[in-house]
Amino acid sequence: MSCVFCDIATGSSPAQVVLDEPDVVGFLDVRPVFKGHVLLAPRAHVATLLDVSADLMPVLMGAAQRVAGAVVEGLGAQGSFVAMNNVVSQSVPHLHVHVVPRTKGDGLRGFFWPRTRYADDAEAAQYAARLRSALAQP
Ligand code: AMP
């Protein structure tokens, strides 16, 4: 099965590579939110965050932290937006972390999604309890 990010990881598809490490490759998003927008992908094919091994997780997040520093140090951004889509809104089914350079007044308004409100504290507490219960599962 062909995968564009696997091809970038092996060098068989072109990309502007910014980070070339044994387990992670970082490259410019071809359609950046802002110039310098980087995608970080595990070299091995991993579909979503839920598929990342415990060993790979700190490697991937460590790389994201370093790239978030590089957009500040290297591009003069004030900060960054770091995120990933998992299944929903994920257009490339090979996990990738977006690192988007951010600067105040850059025009990106809040997040990309609309916000809602909990009906009341009881509803918020119920959501929190459901999540605590799921997190408590082995
Ligand atoms: P997502 O929608 O979160 O899955 O993000 C996928 C991202 O991959 C999009 O921002 C695309 O612009 C980017 N993209 C798709 N193909 C390529 C490619 N060949 N090289 C670099 N970026 C790509």
Image (tube, grey):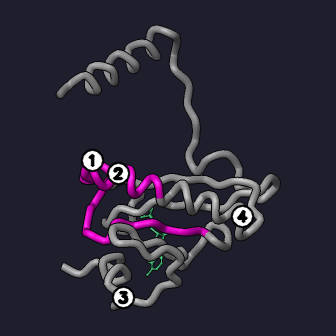
Question: Which residue is disc 4 drawn over?
Answer: 73
Q: Quadrant of the N terminus?
A: bottom left
Drawn side of residue 108 relative to residue 91, left or right? right
Task: Please rate how many residues cluster around mark 4, counting C-alpha atoms within 10 Å: few if below 14, some from 14 to 19, many from 20.
Answer: few
Whole-number angstrom distance, CA of label 3 to CA of label 1 = 26 Å
Which of marks 1 and 4 precedes in the sequence? 1
User: Residue at left 77%, top 59%?
Assistant: 106
Mark 1 element type: loop
What label does residue 103 carry, if any? Answer: none
Q: Quadrant of residue 40?
A: bottom left
Q: Which span is picked out in magenta?
A: 37-62
Amino acid type assigned to the residue bearing label 4 in the image: Glu
Asked if the residue under mark 2 is in contact with the one under mark 1, i.e. CB atoms within 8 Å, the reply is yes
Which of marks 4 and 2 precedes in the sequence? 2
Assess whether residue 52 is covered by the magenta stretch.
yes
Q: Position of residue 26 (x, y in %)?
A: 47, 71
Which of marks 1 and 3 precedes in the sequence? 3
Question: Which residue is disc 2 drawn over?
Answer: 57
What label does residue 11 carry, if any? Answer: 3
Question: Does mark 2's beta carbon lie closer than 8 Å to ligand 1?
Answer: no
User: Residue at left 49%, top 68%?
Assistant: 39
Amino acid type assigned to the residue bearing label 3 in the image: Gly
Whole-number angstrom distance, CA of label 3 to CA of label 4 = 27 Å
Whole-number angstrom distance, CA of label 4 to CA of label 1 = 29 Å
